[in-house]
Amino acid sequence: MRVLFCHDGPLKKDEFSSYYGIAHNDETFKRYYSIAEKLSVIIRVSNITKEEAEEKLSKITVSPFDVRDIPNISNLKGILFDKKRANQIITEAVMNTDFVVARLPSMIGNIAIDIAKKLNKPYLIEVVACPWDAFWNHSLIGKFVAPAMYYATKNRVADATHVVYVTNEFLQNRYPTNGFNINCSNVSLREFNESVLNDRLMKISSTKKDNKIIIGTTGAIDVKYKGQQYIIEALGKLKKEGNVNYEYHLVGGGNKAFLESVAYKNDVSGQVKFLGSLPHKDIFKWLDKIDIYVQPSKQEGLPRALIEAMSRALPAFGANTAGIPELIDKEFIFSNSRKNINEICKILKKFDFDTMKVQSAKNFNESKKYNRSIIEKRRKKFFNEFVKHKGE
């Protein structure tokens, strides 16, 4: 039995033909071996040196693992010149598989679903984010693309017999299906040790009033819908009020020019630290050093970074986006409106030490819902039901 995984990706490939990813890693792909012995992947691939890859990315080691590189059809050039070739690659791959797993939103996923329908191949959809939010908040061109991608996703999900959503409510409400469905996060944490919460509470208790409060975010720093600029602007507003007690640490790759300009404009360059990309194994060490985590993005599914921060018993706040309000208390959610800077300032002022302790415990306990063994057991059961249903 063979399963075909379809998503825009990308993955990275080094000079020795080894593959690496961030959002896609061994844990992503291992789950599909529960329904097939062989896994093929249709995804965009870009090159990277082995040295760069091992420093920043997770190596894909699952086997057998067949990657079919595909042209980038997520931009106008690709649609005009490469779509025919992409269709050929996807059609051949779908013909030679038993099951298709299409992760949406993605152009590759959309095409794979359409071809699977035409060839009468069983397919399952994973809905991991909202295309409307992604494109609408991306750029001016994105605002023209957003309606088409919204309806493309909505229609395909509605017609699917089996759908996995990463959120509990948000994506289900925006992209409902008439088929069988399950909420099953892509975030799966391995260990929960009560000492993490105890250490966090001791850290908060030992913090003095004049100590710097370190706020942190992980995410690409050159994608404006990630929202780090709003936190920087809020620091500028607080500074004008005489409050310079915060530092903002950003983990993530990309060009920092835009965010540096925002920090300079708001006179808080000394309070904003760019740490670059960190290997995933070092993220938890960094999380243990900061004081508050923030997820300010305007586009999400159910954010892995926020759940990982919560698993380190971090007080947290975030934007009213997708699954973020499903994770943290309503009073620590700020809007995606022009009022959000004032709201962010208000939330930061609300985080006295007692509040931080309460939120620390609440967030740690909430993160336990994302225990790897529980989530993967539910997902495996749903996958097997999909295979059984399609075999009847």
Image: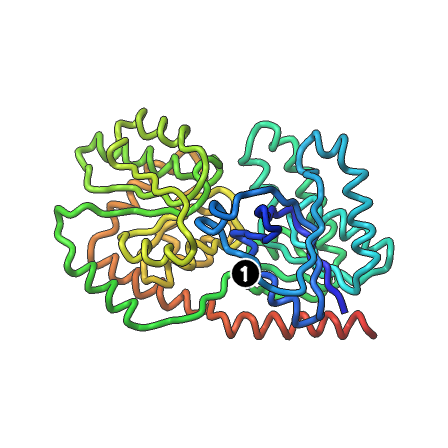
| Residue placed furthest toward the front | 16
Left or right: 203 in relation to 124? left
User: Which coloring applies here?
Assistant: rainbow
> Which amino acid lies under the numbered mark 1 shown in the image of this protein?
Asn
Left or right: 26 in relation to 347? right
In the image, residue 211 above or below residue 64: above
Left or right: 85 in relation to 360? right
The quadrant of the image that shows the C terminus is bottom right
x and y, in percent, of residue 165 in the image: 60, 59
Q: Residue at horizontal 27%, vertical 46%?
A: 348
Viewer-closest of 218 and 132: 218
Viewer-closest of 343 and 91: 91
Q: Residue at horizontal 24%, vertical 33%?
A: 270
In the image, residue 114 above or below residue 74: below
Q: Where is residue 31, by image quadrant?
A: bottom right
Q: Where is residue 168, by image quadrant?
A: bottom right
Viewer-closest of 26 and 295: 26
Q: Residue at horizontal 34%, vertical 64%?
A: 362
x and y, in percent, of residue 193 in the image: 34, 72
Viewer-closest of 264 and 44: 44
Q: Residue at horizontal 45%, vertical 49%?
A: 56
Left or right: 92 in relation to 189? right
Pointer 1: residues within 10 angstroms few (<14), some, or many (20+)? many
Identify the residue position indicated by label 1 in the image.
186
In the image, residue 228 above or below residue 42: above
x and y, in percent, of residue 174 in the image: 62, 51
Q: Where is residue 139, by image quadrant?
A: top right
x and y, in percent, of residue 143 in the image: 61, 32
The quadrant of the image that shows the N terminus is bottom right
